[in-house]
Amino acid sequence: MPRSLDLVVTSVATKLMEVTGSTATQVSQKVLAQLVEQFDVDASFLRHHDHDIRASVLVAEWPPRVDIPDPDPMAVVHFTSADPVLAQCEHGRKPVVIRPDQTSRSFYRWVVGAKQELLPSVAAAPLVSGELTTGVLGFVKFGARKWKQEEINTLEAVAALFAQLQARIAAEEKLRYLAEHDDLTGLYNRRALVAHLSERLAAGSPGPVAVLYLDLDRLKPINDYLGHTAGDWFIRAFAQRIRVCAGSQSMIARLGGDEFVVIPDQPLSPGIAESFARRLGTMLRERLAIGGHMITRTVSIGLAVGVPGRDNSADLLRRADEAVLTAKRGGGNQIAVSTDDMSLKSAFRNDIELHLQGKQAHWNVVGTNFRDLHLQLDELVDFAREASDTIAERMRALDAVPDGRSDTVVATTSLPRFPANEHNTAEVVDRITTRIYATVETLRTVHDAVDAEDPATADILHAQIDGLEKLAWLIKSENRKI
């Protein structure tokens, strides 16, 4: 042999060390090609066991077959219908060597799909993880072949390396699943949703992109009177119903509590998206029996439609959230579509919140340059208060009704909460400028949405963006070091 058997194991270990889930099949095939040459055999295969369905699943093979039919009869082979040679590998924990007189012609057809006159001899080493046999690594030689014990030991060592790789990838995939899915329902979570929506909204992607924000009506009374176990069952049943009604290709996520988001897989115009939302709302309404009580399930849906290259995921989700809040405030069990008027309300409420947070900081800032920052915060408070009043008057001119009540502002602002107690000047500078830029981001989004159709409103928003960015520059300069 050109290399010692120890070097074979070392070489395989090196190749498998950096393998990921996406490269596992390709690298495994290269390793099999190396081993076929090394041991002077005709073919090799790597298969994983799926014990849930009692089947052997093909992972890699060498040489690759040609003219593979669809479906591939060798891709998944059930142990109950497989050749006895494969069946004995289901739970085996020790390598086995099978002579030609112990195999049948059907055996090598599913092993490598080859057409040979000679019956094969096979050496098979199990992949073992803990107490479970998780797969098999096999080598085929047409005709007789005598396997030395040191060769069998080497194959067993290589199989152990493949088993470790299999376990590592399975663990990584499980962690990835947990990182992207909701524990209660198995739906995607916010992290996965935002990643998907950002990809859908990338410039050049097909659009428009519809976002449906669903809020399950009357979940709190179920939790209060029937208990959280009943409430969790209700949520799981609702999640399953969404899967059925929205289609398996749609992105469906649970954001927590009773809030869900559905993003249809196909581009939808605003009119078609609204029709889809209404059909979905109708399909989701049904009576359920919980703890001897019949409950009619209803849902409020907020709809926002975005354009790739123009809208971003945070803004589109915010608009859909605003729309569902409108539906809830209207009594629930209805559809609300995001409009420019709703977006203007968001800018209005952020101005109010910025004014209040600026005053909170103004009262409680301490430390170096306290007086300068104290006075600058007064300028910000005056600007934000006047800005909210300007937007409110513009809304009235457009026959919209501004709602600046404290509970509405708290429930709908996109600004982060401002912490209580005293804060030093450096902390206040960082926190206030963060909130100024968050306000500007909303203003800019609304400005871009209304610019073409309502230049008067766009001019008002532009002036506020300009003023707030100037104030942010003056305030954050307190922390700048040269």
Image (spheres, rainbow, N blue to C red):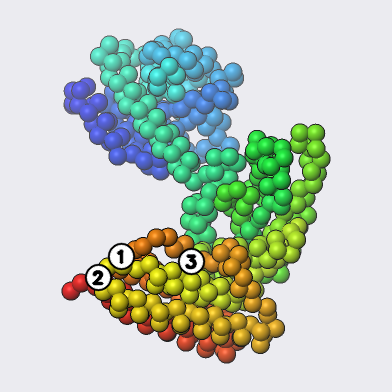
Examine the rendering and report whether any part of residue 279 can be seen: yes
Q: Looking at the image, is mark 3 or mark 2 earlier in the sequence? A: 2
Q: For the residue marked with disc 2, what is the amino acid?
A: Thr
Rendered residue at 45%/19% (across/down):
132
- Check disc 3 and report the residue beneath it: 415
* Above or below, 43 relative to 476: above
Q: Looking at the image, is mark 3 or mark 1 earlier in the sequence? A: 3
Q: Quadrant of the C terminus?
A: bottom left
Residue density around tag 3, few if under 14, some if 14–19, many if 20 or more, within 10 Å: many
Q: Does dot 3 land on a helix, a strand or a loop? A: loop
Q: CA distance from mark 3 to mark 2?
A: 26 Å
- Check disc 1 and report the residue beneath it: 424
In screen coordinates, is 27 left or right of 178? Answer: left
Q: CA distance from mark 3 to mark 1?
A: 20 Å
Q: CA distance from mark 2 to mark 1?
A: 8 Å
x, y (%) of residue 305?
61, 68
